[in-house]
Amino acid sequence: MIYATLKLLHILAIVVWIGGMVFAHFFLRPAALALEPPLRIRLMHGALQRFFSAVLVAIVVVLASGLWMIGRMAKESVQAGIGFAMPLDWTIMATLGIVMMGIFGHIRFALFKRLSVAVASSDWPAGGAALASIRTWVGINLAIGVVIIVLTLLMA
């Protein structure tokens, strides 16, 4: 029961992260383009600030649940005397997930900081440049996330 609950939390956290990127990238940003730069940049800043807070929680949940599930399977395998070799799809998922977390760290703690400074000083060209960088890296993270989903489902 604990394993199933942690797997559910793991997947729900991933849904929040990947789904949020899809929403922001393909729906919010295009709709916001109809707004004047000061309004658009403020809107995106506010939306991203809330989303990035949710992603930080999602990352903690994904890391904790993923490590616990791997540890549990390893422990059960060793106790059964079979030894443990992490499946290839788990290795890919974990490795690319850590890459995604690193990219998110760059987005949240470097690029979003630039956006926040630009919004605070009403520097709309700098805010637009920061948003463009965020968009690029979110697109990369989204692509990696989709690759993880596809590979883990096809390899299962």
Image (cartoon, rainbow, N blue to C red):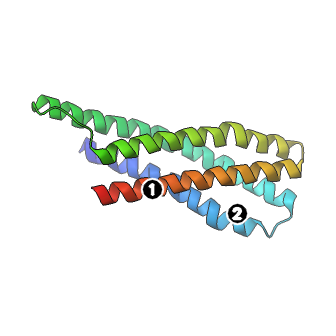
In this orientation, which residue lies closer to the viewer: 138 or 112? Answer: 138
- Position in image of residue 46 (x %, y %): 72, 51
Determine the residue positioned at 70% across, 63% down: 29
Mark 1 Cα-neighbour bin, 10 Å: few <14, some 14–19, many ≥20? some
Determine the residue positioned at 58% across, 56% down: 21
Determine the residue positioned at 63% across, 61% down: 25
Determine the residue positioned at 37% across, 56% down: 151
In the picture, which quadrant includes the N terminus?
A: top left
What type is the residue that disc 2 sits on?
Arg
Q: Would you say residue 58 is visible in this rendering?
A: yes
In the figure, 69 relative to 142: above or below? Answer: above
Residue 29: which numbered mark, if any? 2
- Position in image of residue 139 (x %, y %): 60, 56
What type is the residue that disc 1 sits on?
Val
- Position in image of residue 134 (x %, y %): 69, 50
Residue on which disc 1 sits: 147
